[in-house]
Amino acid sequence: MRKITKAVIPAAGLGTRFLPATKAMPKEMLPIIDKPTIQYIVDEAIESGIEDLIIVTGKGKRAIEDHFDNAFELEYRLMDKEKLELLTEVQRSSSIDIHYIRQKEPNGLGHAIWCARRFIGDEPFAVLLGDDIVVSEEPCLKQLIQFYEQMNASIVGIQPVKESETHRYGIIDYTEQMGRLYRVNKFIEKPTKGTAPSNLAIMGRYILEPEVFDFLEQQEKGAGGEIQLTDAIQRMNEVRPVYAYNFHGTRYDVGEKLGFILTTIQFALQNDELRTPVLSGLKEILQEEKMLKIV
Ligand code: G1P
């Protein structure tokens, strides 16, 4: 059995849903409270035992590299002012080596992963998408790694979504369910409304065997005219089984405005310092809204 030590984090998307904020700043650097979303993802990878990380970037993404680099001047100032807690936080983000590669054309998620093929080589590897933050006792990726180690087969993280939302995700059609594990008949990327075979959606965490690159290599375009990772996984599934695992944990969608706002509120309510003032702020807002008969 091969150990999973490498992970790919695609971060080349244009972030159009958050324009104009993302005109000069990568969407992956938008913070939930005080931490950029991409750092939640990198932390999960590290806590799951990943040793080598590659981030696939694009134009205008330099702030990501700076964030995970040392910041001598800032660190010196924090040390000088004895702000040691902040210093530890700042140093934590530069504690692992991250590699970068650029996706030169915005050709979709499948193409972004394909860009990392030389870094991955002939090993099974992890993929983490930045739009999904997962909070769980055991890191989500670690749960998938444990299954890979038992089954020796590619595995994709899933969770149920509302029927009305299935068209936004990769959806599975399964033949067999063994507890939280599913034997997948078909992976379908963004099925048109009303055609989804289930409500089990791919949630941005994957353990893939390197053979997936043979299918990505064909560069066939799928949903939205883009090269889709889900399509390559489905083609691989036709020759070697790919499983799906309904992981434990709460998933937060930070890839669109409403999800981002709600995640910020929920994370603030879980924060010891912020919980009480945020609750009273929310109460005031709700009272005002009631007076205006809006809610
Ligand atoms: C991507 C994947 C999709 C998955 C989703 C999860 O879509 O292609 O299969 O369900 O992430 O967030 P995107 O949201 O990038 O369009």
Image (spheres, rainbow, N blue to C red):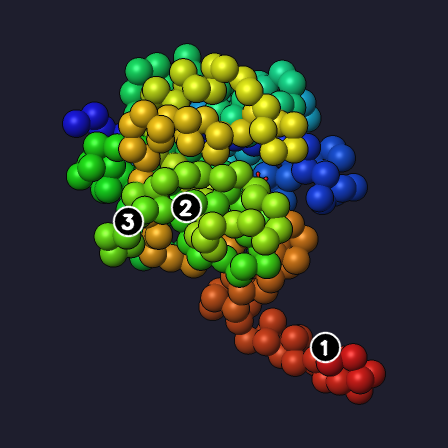
Which numbered disc, 1 or 3, marks the residue closer to the eye? Answer: 3
Q: Which mark is residue 248?
A: none
- Within the displayed image, which quadrant is ligand 1 positioned in? top right
Q: Earlier in the sequence, mark 1 or mark 2?
A: 2
Q: Distance between the residues labelled 1 and 3?
A: 48 Å
Which residue type does callout 3 highlight? Glu
According to the image, label 3 marks what residue? 176
Q: Earlier in the sequence, mark 1 or mark 3?
A: 3
Seen in the picture, residue 105 relative to 48 is either above or below; the reply is above
Residue shown at 44%/39% (left/top)?
187
Q: Distance between the residues labelled 2 and 3?
A: 10 Å
According to the image, label 1 marks what residue? 285
According to the image, label 2 marks what residue? 173
Q: Which of 75 and 44 is in front in this view?
A: 44
Which residue type does callout 2 highlight? Asp
Seen in the picture, residue 238 relative to 265 is either above or below; the reply is above
Residue shown at 56%/49% (left/top)?
195
SS for callout 2: strand
Which residue type does callout 1 highlight? Ile
The picture quadrant where one finds residue 237 is top left
Residue 214 appears at what percent x and percent y? 40, 16
Residue 41 appears at what percent x and percent y? 46, 41
Residue shown at 39%/37% (left/top)?
206
User: Dot 2, crowdedness within 10 Å: few (<14), some or many (≥20)?
Assistant: some
Q: Which of 40 and 195 is in front in this view?
A: 195
Screen quadrant of the N terminus: top left
Q: Can residue 52 be seen in this view?
A: no
